[in-house]
Image: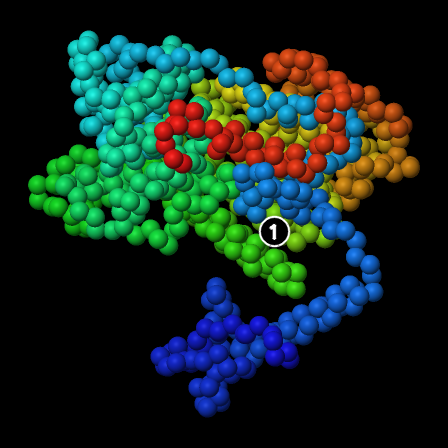
């Protein structure tokens, strides 16, 4: 055994030492007390289901060291005898950016999107979509509507928008006190000229509440003023003391972040929330036992800090940025489960939240219930980010890479279990007053977080010949399809839902995840192919619906449409190659064997030629019949069902005869339908497909993240602040 070998880990106490409460050492194959008593040295497994003998642990450790030594010897011999080729990472193995000096985001920080490069390096896609890069190049310069600051609305409109804020935004984001919101409205709108003599801080906060409260009414047509008009008016009342008002300053910044989820704020939410974090830490909001003038004030400090935590975790994980504060540095407790009125009533007899919590018994859901659920979910997402970042660092050494799968799968399983437990304990509201109290909302949060978790695992799990293990790909596929299904059904059941850039990012990456799973798989079941086809169609339909509210997202929809068409073309090619009679037959699946497509067994898994058939087999003759998008929509089924209940025709997007392909996706028609002017020419010398390398793809993903939470290099309206 090498003297330079890594030290053996310390083992937990054995049963004998634990029972006798004596010190247990890590001696192998038995601890000292067990050696003296000649007893079996047994250690409980982490799950507690079956015992582990320390002698067996010792044997496995010795075998692992011997195999590690042999592996290193083989690698040294291989390097000495074989000329080393230039490093060229395989597609799908991670970020492969040639230069990142000019990027604001480091590839080691942005997680879960390393699969994007493999989607765009497909020669078939490049050959048939020469205009795609020009669409990507236009994304950062998407036109925005010209909006001017507005005046304070009438008292009736103000009352309506303030109530909308309390009944909608306040349910999930209670970082303001309801009584203070109502009192602010009375001060500014009690008589016609009240707002003219009000201080700047009151006017700023009123405009911000109006901006957030008008998001939903403006989009459903019940209010005429664009929310950004209120926001721009609020920026005109940024006083010199904006960041020196203590807790009020943090609340005002959180209002800006809240509005930034729905509309542009002129800077990155991550920058604003980082400024929030600095103020929280300066005021000691992350610490326990801070002096407060009342129970409600102590409660409000906790609510403000934990809402900052929610936005910090979500924006940081989305943009691949570091957290403002580490979880282990947070000491403050959760807010108590009580309404504001309960705290005001108890303020005469109690001056401490801990004492109040011991005596207070909640009789049902409070205004904190949804907030607690959101904070607990962000704590899990924080652990996901931390755990997988640790795994990425620990298994970066090639000599220890063979240990990665076990650690990754164990971490993935444990965190998936935590997410499911979170969903099982989500509150149930008999009569939900808004989306945030509905079970559909909790289902969406679960699906989105599971997708993020599996994406992180996909980036780290070792590949063989550039391929992700099948069982991980299947899990990834089902998770992405579930996300598409949940949000699409939510949009169908709630036609007036307010789409956000965050939702768009979720759907866009879920669709790319399905394409990646299909493109990078080594084998797929017919059911998987069918559900993936239906899911991609549904995803594209939902993305197109979202463009009606998010006009600047239309370029991404064109990109997704091109990828989806390319994937369908390859799926059709594979299915034709696998069909014995090679007939022009659409694939269908039914609940019984009699309705299955001819040529496929009841449970089949077919290897995919050259990763979805870049080169078709010689024996196959392709004769595809076109299916229009309207026919595909008529045959649409829910995408989450991967059982034998699917009954639809696979959408075919091109006609293929022999080696000739008539490509049906024309840039002119699709660009025009999405409001994109111009028809980029395939022969354009300005932007060639050779430029579409990993650097371009990396920048695309960076732009997509910045599209959601803002460009860190822009601080329009906040020039006086140091971010």
| Residue 709 vertical position relative to residue 152 in the rendered view, above or below | below
Q: Is residue 647 toward the left or the right of residue 569 in the image?
A: left
Residue located beneath label 1 in the image: 460
Quarter containing the N terminus:
bottom right
Q: Is residue 41 toward the left or the right of residue 153 in the image?
A: right
Q: Is residue 371 toward the left or the right of residue 706 in the image?
A: left
Quarter containing the C terminus:
top left
Task: Write the residue at 23% across / 29% down.
Answer: 178
* x, y percent for residue 62: 62, 76
Using a 10 Å C-alpha cutoff, classify the residue at mark 1 as few (fewer than 14 neighbours), some (14 to 19) or many (20 or more): many
Under circle 1, the secondary element is: helix
* x, y percent for residue 366: 26, 36
Q: Nearer the viewer, residue 156 or 632?
A: 156
Residue 121: quadrant of the picture:
top right
Q: Is residue 586 visible?
A: no
The single residue placed furthest to the right in the displayed view is 618
Residue 131: quadrant of the picture:
top right
Task: Write the residue at 64% across / 30% down.
Answer: 536
Task: Write the residue at 21% across / 48% down.
Answer: 290
Q: Is residue 61 toward the left or the right of residue 248 in the image?
A: right
């Amino acid at each position: 055994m090498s003297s330079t070998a890594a030290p053996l880990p310390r083992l937990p106490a054995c049963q004998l030492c634990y029972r006798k409460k004596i010190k247990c050492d890590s001696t192998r194959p038995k601890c000292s007390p067990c050696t003296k008593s000649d007893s079996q040295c047994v250690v409980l497994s982490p799950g507690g289901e079956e015992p582990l003998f320390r002698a067996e642990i010792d044997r496995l450790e010795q075998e692992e060291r011997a195999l590690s030594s042999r592996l290193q010897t083989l690698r040294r011999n291989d390097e000495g005898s074989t000329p080393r080729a230039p490093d060229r990472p395989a597609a799908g193995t991670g970020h492969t950016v040639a230069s990142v000096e000019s990027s604001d985001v480091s590839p080691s920080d942005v997680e879960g999107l390393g699969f994007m490069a493999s989607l765009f390096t497909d020669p078939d896609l490049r050959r048939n979509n020469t205009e795609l890069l020009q669409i990507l190049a236009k994304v950062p310069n998407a036109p925005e509507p010209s909006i001017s600051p507005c005046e304070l609305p009438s008292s009736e409109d103000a009352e309506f928008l303030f109530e909308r804020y309390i009944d909608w935004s306040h349910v999930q984001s209670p970082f303001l006190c309801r009584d203070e919101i109502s009192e602010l409205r009375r001060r500014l709108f009690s008589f016609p000229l009240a707002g003219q003599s009000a201080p700047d801080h009151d006017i700023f906060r009123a405009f911000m509440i109006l901006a957030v409260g008008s998001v939903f009414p403006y989009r459903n047509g019940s209010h005429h003023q664009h929310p950004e008009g209120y926001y721009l008016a609020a920026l005109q009342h940024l006083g010199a003391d904006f960041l020196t008002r203590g807790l009020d300053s943090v609340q005002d910044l959180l209002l800006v972040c809240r509005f930034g989820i729905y509309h542009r704020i002129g800077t990155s939410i991550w920058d604003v929330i980082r400024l929030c974090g600095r103020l929280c830490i300066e005021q000691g909001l992350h610490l326990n036992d801070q002096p407060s003038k009342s129970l409600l004030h102590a409660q409000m400090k906790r609510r403000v800090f934990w809402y900052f935590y929610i936005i910090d975790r979500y924006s940081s994980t989305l943009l691949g940025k570091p957290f403002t504060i580490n979880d282990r540095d947070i000491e403050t407790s959760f807010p108590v489960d009580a309404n504001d009125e309960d705290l005001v009533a108890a303020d005469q007899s109690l001056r401490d939240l801990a004492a109040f919590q011991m005596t207070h018994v909640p009789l049902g859901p409070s205004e904190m219930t949804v907030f607690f659920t959101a904070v607990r979910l962000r704590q899990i997402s924080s652990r996901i980010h931390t755990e997988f970042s640790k795994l990425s660092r620990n298994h970066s050494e090639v000599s220890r890479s063979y240990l990665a799968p076990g650690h990754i799968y164990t971490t993935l399983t444990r965190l998936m279990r935590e997410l499911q437990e979170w969903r099982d304990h989500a509150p149930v509201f008999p009569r939900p007053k808004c989306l945030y109290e509905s079970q559909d909302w909790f289902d969406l949060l679960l699906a989105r977080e599971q997708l993020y978790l599996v994406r992180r695992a996909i980036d780290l799990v070792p590949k063989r010949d550039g391929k992700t293990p099948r069982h991980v790909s299947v899990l990834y596929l089902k998770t992405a399809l579930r996300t598409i299904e949940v949000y699409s059904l939510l949009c169908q059941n709630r036609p007036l839902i307010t789409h956000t850039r965050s939702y768009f990012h979720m759907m866009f990456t879920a669709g790319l995840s399905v394409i990646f799973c299909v493109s990078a798989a080594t084998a797929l079941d017919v059911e998987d192919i069918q559900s993936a086809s239906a899911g991609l169609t549904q995803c594209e339909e939902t993305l197109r619906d979202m463009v009606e509210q998010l006009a600047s997202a239309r370029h991404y929809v064109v990109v997704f449409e091109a990828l989806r068409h390319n994937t369908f073309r390859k799926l059709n090619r594979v299915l034709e190659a696998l069909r014995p009679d090679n007939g022009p037959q659409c694939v269908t699946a039914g609940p019984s064997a009699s309705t299955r497509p001819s040529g496929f067994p009841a449970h089949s898994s077919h290897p995919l030629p050259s990763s979805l058939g870049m080169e078709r087999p010689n024996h196959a003759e392709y004769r595809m019949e076109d299916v229009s998008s309207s026919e595909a929509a008529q045959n649409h089924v829910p995408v989450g069902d991967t059982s034998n209940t699917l009954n639809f025709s696979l959408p075919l997007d091109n006609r293929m005869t022999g080696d000739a392909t008539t490509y049906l996706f024309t840039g002119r028609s699709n660009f025009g339908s999405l409001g994109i002017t111009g028809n980029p020419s395939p022969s354009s010398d300005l932007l060639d497909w050779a430029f579409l390398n990993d650097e371009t793809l990396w920048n695309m993903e960076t732009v997509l993240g910045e599209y959601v939470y803002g460009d860190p290099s822009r601080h329009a309206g906040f020039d006086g602040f140091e971010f």
